Image: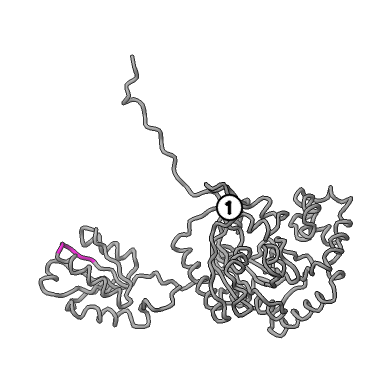
Amino acid sequence: MADDPTDQQEPKLRKLQNPTGIHDILPDDHEYYTFIKKVVRHRCRQAGFRRITTPILEFTDVFERGIGGATDIVDKEMYTFLDKGDRSVTLKPEGTAGVIRSYLQHGMKELPQPVELYYIEPHFRYDRPQKGRYRQFWQFGVEVIGEKDPALDAQVIDLAYRINEDLGIAHLFSIQLNNIGCGKCRTKYKEDLVNFYIGKERSLCSDCQNRLEKNPLRLLDCKKEDCQILAELAPKFEQYRCPECQDFHAKLKEFLDELGIKYVDNPRIVRGLDYYVGTVFEFWDTNQGAQNAIGGGGRYDGLAELMGGQPTPGVGFAAGIERIIANMKRENVKVPSKDDIHIFVAQLGDDAKKKCLPLMNKLRDRGIKTVGALGKGSMKAQLRLADKFNVPYTLIMGITEVREGVVIVRDMSKGQQRPVPIEEIVEEVVKLIGEENLDKYSPGEAIY
């Protein structure tokens, strides 16, 4: 006897979730993102920077050439795939290479130099998810392209520090500073560094064994304990800097002293990208060190050449927004919220609904943040919802109020209410909320 098809159960649909290491940004956290973006925009505009956005998807060559094939990012962490035209493309893992590609492609060398740009964007790395390290993450960064001057490096570091101050976390971090020299003085140092490590390979982690062959400078900033012990004993770069690099570094420190910026000379700071030369710096947690760094940067004078352009100096920094938010929460930094609702509009009946729709628009146009439960039934249910929105006032309109041309204004904290003529209600609400608390907006304003 054949099975009764009604006995066969439908397969259960798998519950859909976001991929590992890639998170939703929920409304409460968006308040932090909004605040950070506002601070970054304000500080960058003050300093004459203009915003740039490069594509999330670039040809893979942009990063292989720019970042360097021997780096962990290119070697292990990039989201790279072939598009339908059989071209290799990559979700951008960092911001600087794309900005320099754009600088060259769009002839920005014809603009007054240096060109000062900033960005606030998502990036992608296939990394092992852990605290402060995600596969999709947001960064803000700045780039100063077209001039080489230690005073510019000092201004970039100062800008990063001031942003951290505005966000209430500057005291948590120290500026770790180094100069990793130019091509001339690095060649001899790399030779001596490799010679120091030869014979000690068994004490190195597997990553550092690979770096010894491909990218020996990265041996200095490995976080594994045995590798750190060897790095402390390794030759120090300061003994190899050419006179020009020594002079540049000394002047940078003088400028930072003049700005009142404290820093730590750290010979082990090298940064993880091949394009860095000269100045490099990172913001380290004063207690946890590099394990909780929130960002860093440095000079990349040879990057434009690597990407097919003329020699063009540049310096910049980038910081991780998720890491910053974690530290703001750790310090209980409260961010201003513009999401609080001023007015809830409750109504009963189609005639009341017709009156409430244009009324809500008039209130919003005056800067009064207004919500209405147009799909709800009973007045009791609507007032319960108004309580959940935590509004100071609710406007109530039913059949009687429509007939009499009034709106009931209910003070939610006192439980008191009174009628107001409908033609006066907008100005009455403005008085209750206060002009200074209105969310004013003009289409001509620069809101981004």
Task: Give the percent coordinates (x, y) of residue 243.
Answer: 85, 76
What span is colored magenta in the figure?
346-350
Task: Please name the residue shown 69% across and 72% down the image.
Answer: 312
Check the image and report above or below for 327 versus 68: below
Left-right relation of 83 to 192:
left
In the image, farthest residue toward the top: 1
Of the pair 383 and 354, the residue shown nearer to us: 354
Check the image and report above or below for 427 versus 387: below
Q: Is residue 417 magenta?
A: no
Tell me if I can see residue 439 in this picture: no
Of the pair 72 and 347, the residue shown nearer to us: 72
Task: Give the percent coordinates (x, y) of residue 430.
Answer: 29, 80
Left-right relation of 262 to 34:
right
In the image, farthest residue toward the left: 403
Quarter residue 59 falls in? bottom right
Of the pair 352 and 159, the residue shown nearer to us: 159
| Residue indicated by mark 1 | 89
Count of numbered circles in the view: 1
In the image, farthest residue toward the bottom: 258
Quarter residue 158 falls in? bottom right
Task: Give the percent coordinates (x, y) of residue 419.
Answer: 18, 76
Task: Please name the residue shown 83% across and 68% down the image.
Answer: 184
Q: Amino acid at mark 1?
A: Val
Task: Give the percent coordinates (x, y) of residue 263.
Answer: 72, 75
Q: Indicate the secondary structure of the residue bearing disc 1.
A: strand
Tell me if I can see residue 392 in this picture: yes
Left-right relation of 151 to 90:
right
Quadrant the N terminus occupies: top left
